[in-house]
Image (cartoon, helix red, strand yellow):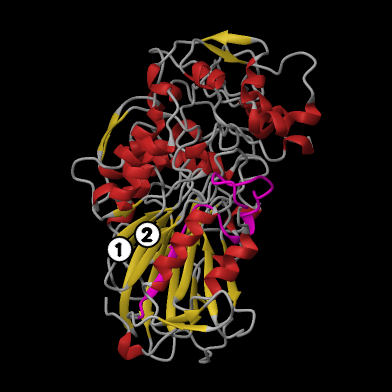
């Protein structure tokens, strides 16, 4: 039986686009439940004119004045797969609603994530926009580049995007984690062993493959090529918190670099308090039975200030990858990056008090309002009256880890004691500034595109574009182009797969390992091929139209 094709492959020459699909080709010796992938024809670009700009047909490629082309990468979740404070055993609670905001903690493909990112970076370097013909002028990341707020994860992320040595392994010379053949839990895929029948649930029930020696190859050090374009960074909840949820307590920080890894919950654990404990006291999950592991000081937690400082590496383009001198001084993670075509504004939507959902504090909101006013000749004030500034109008693109609908972490005071702002309040603020045309984000691991209509002027507003993760199926990035057509702006979005074989063979190269990462993710229960993560066709290859927010003659050229 053939599964419906899905995805978008950007081939090496990038003159054509082909779709990536899960087809009838099965891995030799595997169960029919486990599908290999095949390439099929690409999805067309769908026209979305939700703001009523007119013209029923999509603009032909090359038409309009090219303004900007960028690559959007998000949710890489590069994990130290041997970390003592990743509580993978919680995956056994996948059907318990009390753990819904915690699991999955572990993915079968996660040891190969560095290879998937390396392949993605090399593919991004060779892309060109199908609408404008422009090569990407920059890449924008929107958070959760790492998984467990650890220093060694951050070092690997920066090496992958800047170029340099990547060391996926940690601790001792031998892999010590839940995918080891001798780990006392059969709930996780264990690629080693004596034969394809396998000693674990994934091989028995889902037909996952037998790959002896895979973990050793996956954790071997290699040299990353790095992006050839400038790239901008963003702070996500997995950069800020233990497994993206929990405040890193002193006990948790000590356990990160320690010599013991828990294998199960402690006896008598109160499951009704699971989310509360995971958020505020994650060391409660360290109290159960454990295994001895090799300690590693590089697993230490990384603070927001250290995250910012780490981006000021020699040769970084731009310096600090967006972060500036003020971020170094005050430890904040929001900033402005100006291009000839638009002002890009990075927001820090994370809540250091714990919880995976986002928010904005009042200090950042006041800063945002001032930065927006700087690129508006006029905007609506808080009282509803028009404010004239004398400034030049410029297009604005926001980017952040969380989107509007996941800015819900507002039940406690902000760091300055003032109430936090949620999605509705932030959306109302943005609607006061008409030059915002696009908001890029991630977090949900789902491709989704929503028009955010101005409440009083439905023909005005901006597009919110959420891109799927590299960590999970469909493991894609998004190419975003903006072109000026006079009567409207076209924001053209194209999904791109990394350019690797559809079916891994020898697993001897980075490309083969990246290909296996994608194949494993496609076969993951609940989140693989056919799940909601890929979104629907109108969330993938699209031309998004929006009215120019100011006179075309006053718009900066690209």
Residue at 71% from the left image edge and 34% from the top image edge? 275
Residue identified by numbered label 1: 136
Viewer-closest of 522 and 403: 403
Q: In front: 207, or 359?
A: 359
Q: Would you say residue 2 is visible in this rendering? A: no
SS at mark 2 in the image: strand
Residue 321 appears anywhere in the view: yes
**Are the residues at dot 2 and dot 1 in contact (C-beta closer than 8 Å)?**
yes
Predominant secondary structure in magenta? loop
Q: Is residue 71 left or right of residue 20?
A: left
**Does the segment drawn in magenta span residue 175?**
no
How far across and how far down the image is residue 544, in percent?
50, 76
Q: Is residue 76 above or below residue 183?
A: below
- The percent position of residue 14, horizontal first and vertical second, equals 32, 63
In the image, residue 513 sits, relative to residue 183, either above or below, namely below
Q: Which mark is residue 71?
A: 2
Q: Quadrant of residue 132?
A: bottom left
Whether residue 445 sits left or right of residue 532 in the image: it is left
Q: What x and y, as percent, mark residue 507?
A: 39, 32
């Amino acid at each position: 039986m053939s599964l419906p094709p899905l995805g978008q492959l950007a081939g090496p020459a990038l003159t054509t686009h082909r779709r990536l699909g899960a087809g009838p080709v099965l891995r030799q010796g595997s169960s029919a439940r486990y599908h290999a992938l095949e390439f099929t024809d690409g999805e067309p670009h769908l026209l979305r004119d939700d703001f009523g700009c007119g013209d029923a047909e999509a603009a032909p490629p090359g038409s309009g004045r090219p303004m900007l082309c960028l690559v959007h990468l998000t949710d890489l979740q590069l994990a130290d797969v041997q970390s003592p404070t990743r509580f993978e055993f919680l995956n056994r609670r996948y059907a318990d609603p009390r753990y819904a905001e915690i699991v999955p903690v572990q993915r079968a493909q996660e040891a190969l994530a560095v290879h998937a990112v390396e392949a993605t970076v090399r593919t991004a370097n060779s892309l060109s926009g199908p609408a404008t013909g422009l090569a990407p002028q920059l890449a924008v990341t929107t958070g959760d580049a790492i998984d467990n707020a650890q220093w060694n994860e951050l070092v690997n992320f920066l090496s992958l995007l800047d170029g340099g040595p990547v060391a996926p392994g940690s601790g001792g010379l031998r892999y010590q984690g839940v995918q080891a053949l001798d780990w006392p839990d059969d709930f996780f895929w264990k690629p080693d062993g004596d034969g394809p029948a396998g000693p674990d649930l994934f091989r028995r029930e889902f037909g996952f493959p037998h790959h002896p020696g895979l973990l050793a190859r996956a954790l071997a050090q290699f040299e990353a090529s790095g992006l050839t374009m400038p790239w901008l960074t963003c702070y996500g909840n997995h950069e800020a918190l233990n497994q993206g949820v929990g405040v890193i307590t002193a006990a948790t920080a000590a356990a990160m670099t320690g010599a013991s890894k828990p294998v199960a919950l402690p006896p008598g654990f109160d499951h009704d308090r699971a989310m509360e404990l995971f958020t505020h006291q994650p060391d409660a999950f360290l109290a159960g039975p454990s295994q001895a592991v090799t300690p590693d000081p590089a697993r230490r937690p990384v603070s927001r200030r250290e995250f910012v400082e780490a981006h000021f590496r020699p040769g970084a383009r731009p310096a600090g990858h967006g972060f500036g001198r003020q971020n170094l001084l005050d430890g904040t993670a929001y900033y402005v990056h100006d291009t000839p075509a638009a002002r890009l504004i990075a927001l820090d939507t994370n809540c250091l008090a714990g919880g995976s959902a986002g928010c904005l504090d009042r200090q950042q909101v006041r800063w945002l309002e001032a930065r927006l006013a700087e690129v508006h000749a006029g905007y609506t004030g808080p009282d509803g009256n028009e404010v004239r500034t004398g400034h030049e109008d410029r297009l604005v693109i926001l980017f952040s880890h969380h989107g509007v609908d996941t800015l819900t972490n507002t039940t406690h005071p902000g760091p300055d004691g003032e109430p936090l702002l949620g999605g509705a309040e932030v959306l109302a603020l943005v609607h006061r500034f008409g030059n915002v045309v696009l908001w890029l984000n991630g977090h949900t691991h789902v491709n989704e595109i929503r028009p955010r209509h101005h409440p009083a002027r439905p023909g005005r507003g901006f597009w919110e574009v959420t891109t799927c993760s590299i960590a999970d199926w469909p493991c894609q990035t998004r190419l975003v182009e903006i072109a000026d057509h006079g009567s409207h702006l076209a924001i053209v979005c194209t999904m791109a797969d990394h350019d690797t074989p559809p079916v891994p063979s020898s697993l001897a190269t980075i490309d083969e390992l990246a290909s296996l990462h994608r194949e494993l993710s496609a076969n993951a229960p609940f989140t693989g091929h056919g799940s909601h993560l890929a979104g629907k066709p109108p969330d993938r290859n699209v031309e998004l139209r929006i009215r120019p927010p100011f006179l075309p003659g006053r718009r900066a050229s690209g």
